[in-house]
Image (cartoon, rainbow, N blue to C red):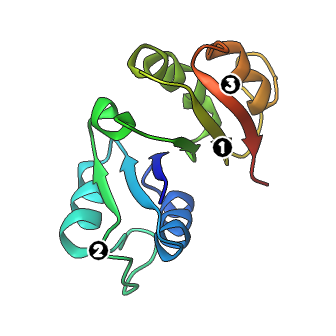
Amino acid sequence: MSRIAILGTGSWASGLAQVLCDNHHQVLCYGIDEKEINDLNEHHQNTKYFPGVALHPEIRATSSLEACLEDADYILITIPTQYVRSTLEKVKSLLKKKVTIINASKGFDMETNMRMSDTIRDVLPDTCREAVVSLI
């Protein structure tokens, strides 16, 4: 079982978290919307995007980036592209070991017009990451 930190609590994050839990991975989502975080933790739902759909009860969420990244083997990025660079700047100082980065954000870096995989490599040095892969 792998420990996967998901950056985001939106529809894409919830859908991917469900698939990962169904495949016996440990998932913790990081978000900034307390309502979504509470909905995931208390009701095992993301009613904002999937009303009436029960999500895997082992999907957990937190507003603490540090807690989300603790002991993660993989980081799955699902946040909007305009927040990827600034979020990864915070991630960089919190990583204690190399992790594989999986990009699932759609679009380009709005500051530089770089592909997300290039932005990830630009922000996170080799000492922080194993592979960088994209899910499209």
Q: Earlier in the sequence, mark 1 or mark 3?
A: 1
Which secondary structure, mark 2?
A: loop
Furthest toward the front, the residue is 1
Mark 3 lies on residue = 120
Mark 1 lies on residue = 102
Residue 7 makes an appearance in the image: no
Q: CA distance from mark 3 to mark 2?
A: 30 Å
Which secondary structure, mark 1?
A: strand
Using the image, determine if residue 116 lies above or below residue 3: above
Q: Earlier in the sequence, mark 3 or mark 2?
A: 2
Where does residue 50 sit, x and y in percent of width and height? 45, 77
Furthest toward the bottom, the residue is 52
Amino acid carrying label 1: it is Ile
Q: For the point 54% across and 30% down, which residue is it?
A: 83
Picture disc at residue 44: 2
Which numbered mark, 1 or 2, is in the foreground of this view?
1
Where does residue 114 sit, x and y in percent of width and height? 81, 23
